[in-house]
Image (cartoon, rainbow, N blue to C red):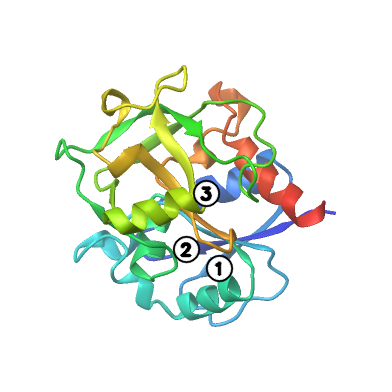
Amino acid sequence: MKPKFGVVTFPGSNCDYDAFYAIKKVLDFDAEFLWHKDTSFNGIDVIVLPGGFSYGDYLRTGAIAKFSPIMDQVTEFAEKGGIVLGICNGFQILLEAGLLPGTMQVNESLKFVCKDIYLKVENKNTPFTNSIDKDPIKIPIKHGEGNYYADVKTVTELEKNGQIIFRYSSKNGKVSNEYNPNGSISNIAGIMNKKQNVMGLMPHPENACDPILRKTDGQLIFKSIANSLFN
């Protein structure tokens, strides 16, 4: 049995086809595109909010996308326990929509960053990480506004609840400012909600799935999700 992923396209999305290709063509799961004006979706097991520049991000990343008609359905889906994965701009949209805590700032360097990075897996007992058999993993980032910020109380809560899933690290798993590509607080690269069914991460697992790219660690996240649904 295959999980069915719904990949949402907002005006300005540019990684929706990458996500669809990785899920459908590389991993052989079911997938379909969902339009931002859709007000219902049936038979979907996982919602993916992809990377890109929704609505051009002219106001603030994700700030307009949160008002898209489909977001009411995404919120309802999440509240009922449905799995939602937000990647890069999708992570920013989840923050703007209040499905995850915190906010996103411009990279500390004030520069757009595009490169492969390493992620220390902080919690392997989640629907998004249960099949990850290595640590750290290597997948790419490509963003100008990935500097995650939350106040001390919120970060403390995330730590206490095991909601911090990935931190930027060295290739040996060392977490320090030296390996932080954007200034994110506590090197945070990915978090989930308390119910463990909504995750946002700045790196792009969909761009580390196809063996032709010589990097496949992103597969482990999608396979973890599938494993959580049917095992």
In this view, the mark in front (3 or 2): 3
Residue count near mark 2 (Cα–Cα under 10 Å), binned few <14, some 14–19, many ≥20: many
Residue count near mark 1 (Cα–Cα under 10 Å), binned few <14, some 14–19, many ≥20: many
Q: Which residue is mark 1?
A: 34
Looking at the picture, which amino acid does disc 2 mark? Thr
Looking at the picture, which amino acid does disc 1 mark? Leu
Could you tell which of marks 3 and 2 lies nearer the N-terminus?
2
Q: Which residue is mark 2?
A: 9
Residue 15 visible? The answer is no
Label total for image: 3
Looking at the picture, which amino acid does disc 3 mark? Gly
Residue in the image at 53% along x and 73% along y: 74
Residue in the image at 36% along x and 63% along y: 95
| Distance from the alpha carbon under mark 3 to that under mark 1 | 31 Å
User: Which image quadrant is residue 144 in?
Assistant: top left
Instruction: Pick the quarter of the image with the N terminus.
Output: bottom right
At mark 3, the secondary structure is loop
Residue count near mark 3 (Cα–Cα under 10 Å), binned few <14, some 14–19, many ≥20: some
Could you tell which of marks 1 and 2 lies nearer the N-terminus?
2
| Distance from the alpha carbon under mark 3 to that under mark 2 | 30 Å
Query: Vertically, is 131 above or below 175?
Result: below
2 vs 212, nearest the viewer:
2
Residue in the image at 45% along x and 18% along y: 171
Q: Residue furthest left?
A: 110
Image position, residue 124 (x, y; %): 62, 40
Q: Indicate which disc residue 54 carries.
A: none
> Could you tell me if the residues under marks 3 and 2 are in contact, i.e. CB atoms within 8 Å?
no
> Could you tell me if the residues under marks 1 and 2 are in contact, i.e. CB atoms within 8 Å?
yes
Q: Indicate which disc residue 162 carries.
A: 3
Residue 156 visible? The answer is yes
